[in-house]
Image: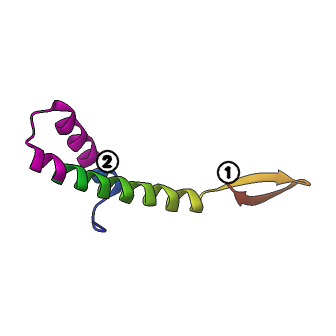
Amino acid sequence: MENIKFEEAMQKLEEIVNKLEGGKVPLDDSLKLFEEGMKLAKFCDERLKDAESKLTMLVKKNGEMIEEPFK
């Protein structure tokens, strides 16, 4: 799953949710879709946390621009 882009993972996750909400998927297939969806959700969550940790913002302190972690 490491080779997939965030946007692709989100799209696949949305497709899985739509299938499961439709209620027309057999139980065994639903379980497989659910497991895949959980993996995709975890992947997306990790990617978002990684991106968040890299964000910084420029702040003006004492007339000087410095970088600080974005909160």
**Residue at x 89%, y 53% (from the top left corner):** 63
Quarter occupied by residue 27 = top left
Residue marked by disc 2: 10
Estimate the spatial distance between the alpha carbons at disc 2 and disc 1, rounded to whole Å. Answer: 24 Å
Tell me residue 56's x, y (percent). Answer: 65, 57
**Residue at x 23%, y 55% (from the top left corner):** 36
Mark positioned earlier in the residue sequence (2 or 1): 2
**Residue at x 17%, y 38% (from the top left corner):** 19
What secondary structure is marked by label 1? Answer: loop
Furthest residue toward top: 22
In the image, is 40 to the left or to the right of 44? left
Residue type, label 1: Lys
The image shows residue 4, relative to residue 41, as above or below, that is below
Graded by Cα atoms within 10 Å as few (under 14), some (14 to 19) or many (20 or more), the crowding at tag 2 reads: some
- Inspect the magenta stretch and tell me whether residue 65 lies in it: no
Q: Which mark is residue 71?
A: 1
Span colored in magenta: 10-31
In the image, is 28 to the left or to the right of 59? left
Graded by Cα atoms within 10 Å as few (under 14), some (14 to 19) or many (20 or more), the crowding at tag 1 reads: few
